[in-house]
Amino acid sequence: MIGNVGFRSLVSAVLLGCAASLAAQVNAPAPQPDANDCRLSTLQVCVKHVAHDEAGIVTSPLHFRGQDLLWVIPFGVATGVAVHYDTQAIHDLGVHPAREKDFNRFSDYGGLYLPFAAAGVGYIAGDVQKDNYMTETAVLSAEAMADAGILDEGLKYALDRENPMLDNARGGLWPHGPKGWPNSPSMPSEHAMNVWAFAHVVAGQYNGIATNVLVYGLATGVSVSRVLARQHFPSDVVVGSTLGWMVGGHVLHHRSREHGMPDLSAVETPLGRGLAVTWNLNRGQ
C-alpha cells in the first residue's frame, strides 16, 4: 500500500524528472506565434482548433487506407482478447479496498492532475522564458487532452458498457437497454486516453530517451492502475490507451510546426515575386 508521504514523494519525483529531462534537451526554437495560434489571449482560436481536430478524428474512419490494416488488425485482436478475458481478470484480482484506493488515487494524479498541471506549468514557464517551443508543447498537449476527453465521453455513452463494479463484472453493453441508459459506462478509460494523448505530444516534441521513458512510463503505469483499482476492464484500458495515443498523434501532425504541414510565404526573388515552402524537419533532441 502506498502511504501518503510515499505517494507525494512519487509525484514530486515524476515532476522533477520531467523538468530535468526537458531542460537537458536542446531543440530548435519554434517560430514566433501569430494570430492563428492557440494562446490564453486567443481562446476562440483554441476552441476552433479543438473542434476542427475533433471533427477530423471522428471522421477518420471515412479515410481508411489499406496500410491502416497494419495497426487496425493488431488493435482489433488485442481488444477482442481483452474483452474475452475481462470478467475473469477482474475476478482473479479479487476485492482489496486498500489496494484499490491507492491505485485509484495514483491514476487520478498521474492520468488527470499531473498532465494538466504539466501543461499549465509548461505554458507559464515558456511564456516567462520566451521559449515558444515549450509554450507550443504545452498548448498542443492541452488541446490533445481536450480532444481525448470529448471523444471519450462520446464513446462511453455510445457503448454504455457496465463498469467492473456492477453485475458481477460481466461488462455488458447496453445491459438494460435504452431505459437504463447510461449505466455507469466504462469503455474507454478516460484516464488512459488522457495520459496517452499527453504522452504522445510531449514525446513527439521532446523526443529524447529520458522524456520518452518518463511520459510513456507514466502512461503505462496509469493504464495498469485503472485495472488494479477495479475502475476499468483491461479492454477499456487497451481501447483508451490506443485511441489516446492516436489523438495525440493527430494533434501533432496537424498543429505542431515541426511535425505538421509546410508553411507557405511570399518572397521576392531576382526573377520577381515567388512562393517559398518551408518545412521544419528539426525535432527536439
Image: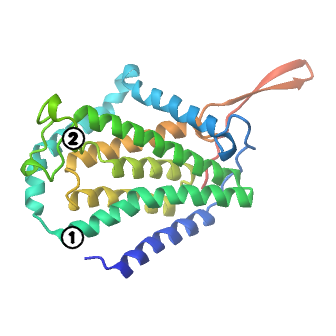
Residue 203 in the image, given as x and y percentages of width and height: 50, 52
Q: Quadrant of the N terminus?
A: bottom left
Quarter occupied by residue 47: top right
**Residue at figure coordinates x 32%, y 44% from the top left:** 240
**Residue at figure coordinates x 52%, y 43% from the top left:** 143
Residue 252 in the image, given as x and y percentages of width and height: 53, 40
Q: How many marks?
A: 2
Q: Secondary structure at mark 2?
A: helix
Q: Residues within 10 Å of mark 1 (few under 14, many from 20)?
A: some
Instruction: Say the numbered circle drawn on residue 205.
Output: none
Q: Earlier in the sequence, mark 1 or mark 2?
A: 2
Tell me if residue 108 comes above or below residue 278 in the rendering: below
Instruction: Say the numbered circle drawn on residue 79.
Output: 2
The answer to whether residue 218 shows anywhere in this view is no
Q: Secondary structure at mark 1?
A: helix
Query: Which amino acid does the dot numbered 2 rest on?
Result: Thr
The answer to whether residue 281 shows anywhere in this view is yes
- Describe the colour scheme in one phrase: rainbow
Q: Is residue 109 left or right of residue 137?
A: left
Q: Nearer the viewer, mark 1 or mark 2?
A: 1
